[in-house]
Amino acid sequence: MDRNQLLHEGVVAKFLRYVQVETTSAEEPQTIPSTPGQWELARMLAAELQAMGLTDVEVDEHAFVTATLPARGAEHAPVIGFLAHMDTSPAAPGRNVKPILHRAYPGGPIQLPAGPVLREEEQPLLREVIGHDLITSSGDTLLGADNKAGIAVIMEALARLLRDPSHIHGTLRIAFTPDEENGSGIALFDPARFGAVAAYTVDGGPLGELEWENFNALNLRVVIEGRAAHTGTARGTMINSLHLAAQLIGSVPATARPETTLGREGFIHVDRIEGSVERVAMVWLLRDFTASGLDAKRQWLERAVEALRLAHPGCRITVEALGGYRNMREVLETFPEVVERARQAYRDVGVEPVELPIRGGTDGAQLTHMGLPTPNLFTGGVNFHSRTEWVSVQWMEKAVEVLLALARRWAENPAPQARP
């Protein structure tokens, strides 16, 4: 695509192009990126960034795309970054996404061609976007607003900065990253090389979301090894790993599950299970907003596992940590100007910040603990990871305006340098 088209096509055209590239990540990656489609999108974005005129455009060996927009009128302002991830969740199909633009949503249900229906009683935010232009998938797949809406918002903000010389901004660093959904990609990112004092992931949901607090997370693999035997002669010899797994899962308190918690309540969740009489493997997700709360949940699981071992002495149970992330609040509280700049930018464009803790995580959580303070901004997308995912075009446009205002805020009112 030529430069003129990229600078003038708008955020919708960008978004519709990006969602049609299949970038579903693998749940247990063997490589980074974990799927070839992420390479395809990385190369597409790099080519567009070069065509638009950004400098230092690179795609590294793990498909991280980075680029620089040189300062205009604020050469001494701190360098800040904007980031979005390229992969989509494996929770719903991501191949052959067919985006549909619904002009001037009149309210009421939206029937998708493949069968799913978006209903206001199930998704009350639909009541807030009557009259908006909405984008959905056909219902066969997810849409991919998480996080291709973020990519489109960043690319459109760059286009507007480039085509309008009245915009004053410091040096902006851009990154599009792989494998956020499985939590594996960002560990390979080099904040020092990126060179920003602060950054913002554009990976949130509805209008106004500003997130700078998230779960502490620990993912564990629990493997139960029993003993197989012929069912006709199993008495006294068989140890059925499936039954043991059921006992362990059934011991999770009803009030400690994702489906019964909200707000700042943590949870214990069995995410996946596979196996047979002889061996069962499960993935458990432990989440809490405090480190002590997360530790208490791990201790609960370890006690439950030990009780199972004692009750069934012939079995073998192992617990292995698969990774996790930490609450970014404990770091961002020491960089209040990074979050405050975002609040100011929201209000500059008529958006009131909605500051709620993330019941999940973002690349920004890990980046913050890697030394790059990185709150999370909204994209305009709703109901991520599902076939009924949707995005408001007007909310995406507001997200673009926020990035422009944020760049201006950092240029006009330089904040103290971030600590190393």
Image (cartoon, grey):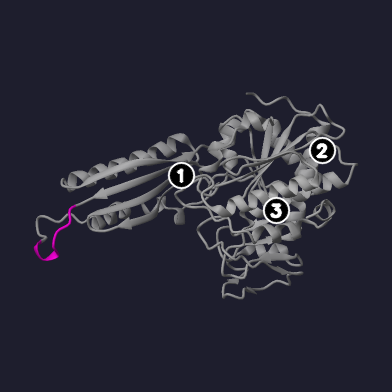
Q: Label 2 sits on what residue type?
A: Arg
C-alpha span from label 3 to label 2? 20 Å
Residue denoted by label 3: 207
In the picture, residue 389 is in which quadrant?
A: bottom right
The quarter of the picture where the N terminus appears is bottom right
The residue that disc 1 covers is 287
- Badge 3 marks a residue whose secondary structure is loop
- Return the x and y of residue 178 as percentages of the image width and height: 58, 46
Name the quadrant of the C terminus. Answer: top right
Which residue is nearer to you in this view: 396 or 99? Answer: 99
Identified by mark 3, the residue type is Leu
Residue 341 in percent (x, y) is at 74, 36
Q: How crowded is mark 3: few (under 14 residues within 10 Å), some or many (20 or more)?
A: many
In the displayed structure image, the side of residue 60 where residue 403 appears, left or right: right
| CB contact under 8 Å: marks 3 and 2 | no
Which mark's residue is nearer the viewer, 3 or 2? 2
Magenta residues span 227-233
Label 3 vs 2, first from the N-terminus: 3
Q: In this view, does 256 lie to the left or right of 376?
A: left
- Pointer 2 residue: 408
259 or 41: nearer the viewer? 41
Q: What element carries label 2?
A: helix
| Sequence order check, earlier mark of 1 and 3 | 3
Q: Residue at x 71, y 25 (%)?
A: 417
Q: How far apart are marks 1 and 3 (CA)?
A: 26 Å
